[in-house]
Amino acid sequence: MNPQASALNEVLEAQNPAVYSLLSKRGKAIFFPKKGLVMQGKDASGKRINASIGMATEDDGSPLRLAAIESLVNMPPEKVFPYAPSYGLLPLRQKWQSIIRSKNPSLGDTELTMPVVTNALTHGLSMAGYMFLDEGDTVILPDYYWGNYNLVFKNAYLADFDTYPMYKEGGFNLEGLKEKLMAPGTKKVVLLNFPNNPTGYTPTDAEMKGIRDVILEAAEAGKNIAVLIDDAYFGLVFEEGVATESIFASLADLHQNVLAVKVDGATKEDYVWGFRVGFITFSWKGMTAEAGQTLVDKVAGAVRGNISNDSILSQNLLLTAYDNPGYADDKKGKYALMKSRYDLVKKTIASHPEYSEYFDAIPYNSGYFMCVELKKGNAEDVRQKLLADYDTGIIALGSLIRVAYSSLPAAYIEELFNNIYSACKDLD
Ligand SMILES: Cc1ncc(COP(=O)(O)O)c(C=O)c1O
């Protein structure tokens, strides 16, 4: 074990053995090299003669650059061309932490780590896997989940999934989660994703409290729990009574055996899918800045060894946008557009009772998606029919059809559902 990793481990283990025990072998071994190339480059910055960094400069010291690229971006070259730190740009990390607090006011002044920048959420989830999953470890999650978790956690880290039915009596299945948490074994890794992909479901305020209580009960029973919180669609809640704060806010200060890992980012929240800017943030009850920093250094080391660092251009575009006076209103306008599509989906389903001969919507209230469950046949046959005869594309998931109404102009919404209905009828 590298002595720099051991030094981080000693701090964490002394301050919170439960959280330390959640680290994977890789998570224990990783560290951010304090004496390596990056640090030597830092030492050299500002020196008259600096021959330390693997970048190239013009004779005036600015980034060496091609006009064909520079002319496309209306930002100073220093914000476009150089490497970013592996941790991410500090002002962006600080901004994002303050955004997390303002969007989740119940966090109050709970100690959070400074978010580390990842190559958007997929990479943030992968870094969480790196830190907390060994071969054969189990991830507890609902049966409806984003398909890419298979590649992220099973293929990459050889983890297993233990799923529970997401719904019970039309709401979130708290008992299902509890049963998995209370099953034998001390280390528990739980994955929560609200608004959920594919279902578009976010628990109600009462259900969120229930999730918190179930996790607390398990922690009090001696379980050590890492809760990986995929907040990809955070902020897009369209119904009253549905939780508008992340479950992270309820877990960050819950129990010293509960490590809350928030994976979030600009991808869906700020409609910048190709920018690839995400964040990973940690908290547990009683976390000190020093102990939190051990996880920050470890995850930044994992980023360094994996993608080196994330696009400085994307990070600076976002940082600049967050300070634009029009940002908040613009964002409200886009929320209103997404909500209008959601409302139209609800209205369409409600005004077509004939649909229920072939399918019903499963609970949804948020995010980009909703699903209908077929009463007969399988969704792949319907999908093929829709492609062949109705000029219509949907996603088929077993007996579910996932509809991304986020990308449907209002004029197509009723037609889409009518097409699904007709395709089902054709196949009957
Ligand atoms: C639930 C969920 N998590 C994470 C992601 C990945 O987001 P990103 O594009 O930021 O990697 C997606 C994208 O579809 C998603 O649906």
Image (cartoon, helix red, strand yellow):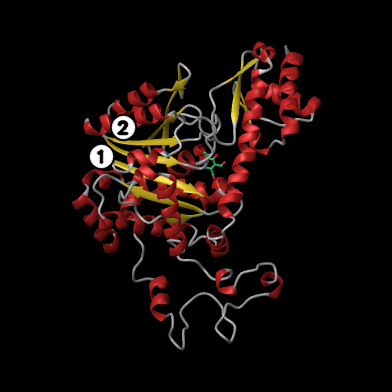
State the SS at label 2: helix
Residue 325 is situated, as x and y percent measured from the top left of the image, at 56, 58
The yes-or-no answer for disc 2 within 8 Å of ligand 1 is: no
- Along the line of sight, the residue nearer the viewer: 122 or 252: 252
State the SS at label 1: loop
Rendered-image quadrant of the N terminus: bottom left
Q: Residue furthest left?
A: 14
Q: Is residue 280 above or below residue 249?
A: below
Q: Is residue 202 above or below residue 282?
A: above
Q: Residues within 10 Å of mark 2 (few under 14, many from 20)?
A: many
Residue 213 is situated, as x and y percent measured from the top left of the image, at 30, 29
Q: Earlier in the sequence, mark 1 or mark 2?
A: 2
Side of 340 relative to 17 (left or right)? right
Q: Residues within 10 Å of mark 1 (few under 14, many from 20)?
A: many
Where residue 142 sits, quadrant-wise, is: top left
Question: Is residue 133 shown to the viewer in this render?
Answer: no
Amino acid type at circle 1 is His
Amino acid type at circle 2 is Ile
Question: Is residue 327 shown to the viewer in this render?
Answer: yes
- Quote the CA–CA distance across marks 1 and 2: 9 Å
- Residue placed at 54% from the left, 27% from the top? 364
- Along the line of sight, the residue nearer the viewer: 263 or 351: 351
Q: Are marks 1 and 2 in contact (CB under 8 Å)?
A: yes
User: Which residue does the numbered mark 1 point to in the structure image?
Assistant: 255
User: Which residue does the numbered mark 2 point to in the structure image?
Assistant: 215
Side of 61 relative to 406 (left or right)? left
Which image quarter has ligand 1?
top right
- Residue placed at 54% from the left, 71% from the top? 82
Residue 103 is situated, as x and y percent measured from the top left of the image, at 44, 46
Residue 172 is situated, as x and y percent measured from the top left of the image, at 44, 24
- Residue placed at 46% from the left, 24% from the top? 166
Q: Is residue 414 above or below residue 89?
A: above
